[in-house]
Image (cartoon, rainbow, N blue to C red):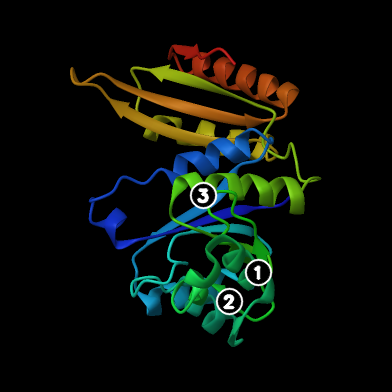
Amino acid sequence: MTHFGAIIIGDEILSGKRRDGHFPRVIETLGKRGLELKWCRIIGDDPALIVATLRQTLPQDDIVFSFGGIGATPDDHTRQCAAEAAGVPLVRHPDAVAEIEARFGAEAYPRRILMADLAQGSRIIPNPFNRVPGFSLDRHHFLPGFPQMAWPMMDWVLDTLYPDIRNQAPETETVITVLDAMESPLLDLMNEFVLRYPDLRFSSLPHIGEDGERKVEFGLRGARTRVAHGAAFLKQEIGKLGLKSEQMAD
């Protein structure tokens, strides 16, 4: 099973000045391929924090998409931080130079060409919008913060570098709502369920309505036949407790 992660970088997101669109897009993009996001971190433009984050994630086997901070302005730190976290120098990448020169010609110098300085060992990710590339370092893929650039580049990475990684997400899911109930009286049932069905992903989400009405939603995810068996077991045991339940259609 391949796990996917996302790192979204930008002070403007944490301050609320800009609404992030990458998180839902990553979920959607992976979902179209039968994949799902395992984790996501949103961090500011703090070099020490970016380095610390990448030092944690680079050694892992996860495929990670990082958004933002790969430009040449003073608040763009990701290229330098990736090199520091990997323990390699920042070097001028010839393929990145070729792309930037092809797009800007003599105007690539002296500033735009700085975006060709990448962590040693990087591979470029083509940018169909303006040809300023992103880069891959091991299984981490660093993309611009601009959605119109980043999202097609993410598609390219998945389709070109990982074409065989597909259909790993749970086959189906369902939700069983226990009416007029709280979680505490259902704990024994939950524990028994996870022992009986260790192959299913199980979640419990309590709700309190504006009128004080309480209910608990049990979420089940996994292979279709196992989800059906697990749902039948839960509904049967909920009934034995004298409670009513409703099941959301798959």
Labels 1 and 2 touching (C-beta < 8 A): no
Mark 1 to mark 2 CA distance (whole Å): 14 Å
In the image, 217: left or right of 15? right
Residue 58 or 154: which is nearer the viewer? 154
Q: Quadrant of the C terminus?
A: top right
- The reply to whether residue 137 is in sight is no
Sequence-wise, the earlier of marks 1 and 2 is 1
In the image, 90: left or right of 72? right
Mark 3 to mark 2 CA distance (whole Å): 18 Å
Q: Going by the picture, which residue comes out furthest to the right?
A: 164
Q: Mark 2 highlights which residue?
A: 118
Q: Is residue 105 above or below residue 155?
A: below
Q: Is residue 178 above or below residue 12?
A: above
The residue under the point 67% across, 48% down is 156
In the image, 149: left or right of 18? right
Q: Going by the picture, which residue comes out furthest to the left?
A: 211
Q: Amino acid at mark 2?
A: Leu
| Percent of width and height locating residue 14 | 28, 56
Q: SS class of the residue under badge 3? A: helix
Sequence-wise, the earlier of marks 1 and 3 is 1
Q: SS class of the residue under badge 1? A: helix
Residue 222 or 113: which is nearer the viewer? 113
**Image disc number at residue 98:** 1
Q: Amino acid at mark 3?
A: Met
Q: SS class of the residue under badge 2? A: strand
Q: Mark 3 highlights which residue?
A: 149
Q: Is residue 178 above or below residue 68?
A: above
The residue under the point 52% across, 55% down is 6
Q: Quadrant of residue 96?
A: bottom right
